[in-house]
Image: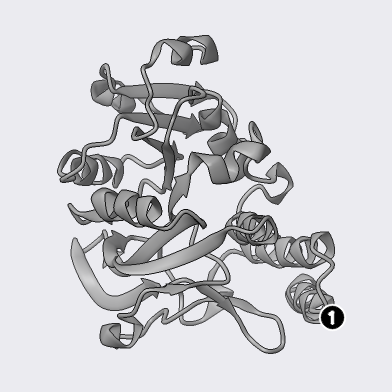
């Protein structure tokens, strides 16, 4: 499929377009797609961008008139792959949902997101309550994965409520400083000014969702955490962060430093300290 073919897709101001970036996602993608097909408000189109998987033949069985598959033979990163998906949206598209393949949405999510943005013209993006899911044992963890992204007084960004079982504590809808990139329901008009590079590709992965959130807020858009939009997220988190590969921890720390510099944040001291701890700690 070429970008030009997207022109022939009949989008409307009510159309909901899903962009999913896959990379070695065979264990989770089918369930992700099943959750989309079970939505009370069906998406208009699903665009899968495979970013450098070693084997992606399994993806072909999902392709149909409403699901388009694009293969990139190198792993170009989460942000760049999502930007690749943006090329396939027509100018008349109403909404775009950036969704990780390891997120399984409850059936009302898309309908709630669309209704929320229709009723609140200044909300540019909304997301919901993501709960943890252990794909290896095929069961819910009962713990929160993300209830919006917040920042500590000293500058560390974190997923609110992560690891907690106190779901009711995060049961109120509220504006948030940033939203988790695993599930972002976006008004096209909010992100259109960034086309075709909605995500800053210099982040590769990690912190690109916070960067987009900050840019949207700077342009006057509100970001809404809506707990009735619920989903399961298979992201694995380690109690001891040293169990995460050093290269990934270093990338996350580097991106936090990049984030503070780009947005002229006073928290650059914390970000620099964190980066040096990770870089020098395993020497």
Q: Position of residue 234 (x, y in %)?
A: 34, 60
At horizontal 34% and vertical 76% (from top left) the residue drawn is 144
Residue at 47% x, 53% y is: 121
Q: Residue at x 40, y 60 (%)?
A: 127
Q: Is residue 88 above or below residue 166?
A: above
Answer whether residue 276 is visible to the viewer in this image.
no
Relative to 135, 73 lies left or right: right
275, 216: nearer the viewer? 216
x then y, percent, for residue 256: 72, 66
- Quadrant position of the C terminus in the picture: bottom right
Above or below, comparing residue 44 to residue 131 in the picture? above
For residue 218, side relative to residue 184 (left or right): right
Which residue is tagged 1?
A: 269
Q: Classify the position of the N terminus by image quarter.
A: top left
Closer-to-camera residue (224/18): 224
Residue 261 x, y percent position in the rendering: 84, 64
Location of residue 118 with respect to 171 vertically, above or below: above
Q: Is residue 73 left or right of residue 195?
A: left
Query: Coloured how?
Result: one colour
Numbered-mark total: 1
Residue 241 is left or right of residue 17, and the answer is right
Note whether 239 is above or below 17 in the view shown. below
Residue 245 visible to an observer of this rendering: yes
Based on the displayed image, in which of its 4 quarters is residue 232 positioned?
bottom left
Q: Residues within 10 Å of mark 1 (few under 14, many from 20)?
A: some
Q: Position of residue 53 (x, y in %)?
A: 47, 33
> Mark 1: which secondary structure?
helix
């Amino acid at each position: 499929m070429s970008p030009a073919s997207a022109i022939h897709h009949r989008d409307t101001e009510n159309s909901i377009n899903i962009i999913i970036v896959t990379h070695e996602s065979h264990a989770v993608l089918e369930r992700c797609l099943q959750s989309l097909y079970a939505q009370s408000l069906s998406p208009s189109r699903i665009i899968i961008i495979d970013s450098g998987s070693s084997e992606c033949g399994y993806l072909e069985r999902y392709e149909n008139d409403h699901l388009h598959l694009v293969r990139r033979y190198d792993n170009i990163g989460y942000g760049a792959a999502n930007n690749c998906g943006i090329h396939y949206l027509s100018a008349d598209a109403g909404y775009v949902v950036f969704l990780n393949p390891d997120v399984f949405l409850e059936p009302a999510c898309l309908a709630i997101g669309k209704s929320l943005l229709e009723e609140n013209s200044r909300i540019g993006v909304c997301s919901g309550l993501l709960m943890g899911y252990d794909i290896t044992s095929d069961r819910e963890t009962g713990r929160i994965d993300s209830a919006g992204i917040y920042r500590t007084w000293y500058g560390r960004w974190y997923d609110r409520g992560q690891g907690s079982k106190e779901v009711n504590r995060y049961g109120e809808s509220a504006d948030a400083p940033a939203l988790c990139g695993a599930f972002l329901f976006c008004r096209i008009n909010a992100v259109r000014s960034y086309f075709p590079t909605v995500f800053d590709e210099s982040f590769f992965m990690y912190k690109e969702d916070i960067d987009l959130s900050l840019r949207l807020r700077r342009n006057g858009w509100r970001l809404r955490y809506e707990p009735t939009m619920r989903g399961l997220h298979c992201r694995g988190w380690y109690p001891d962060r040293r169990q995460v590969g050093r290269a990934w921890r270093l990338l996350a720390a580097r991106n936090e430093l990049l984030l503070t510099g780009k947005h002229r944040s006073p928290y650059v001291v914390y970000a620099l300290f964190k980066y040096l701890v990770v870089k020098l700690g395993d020497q």
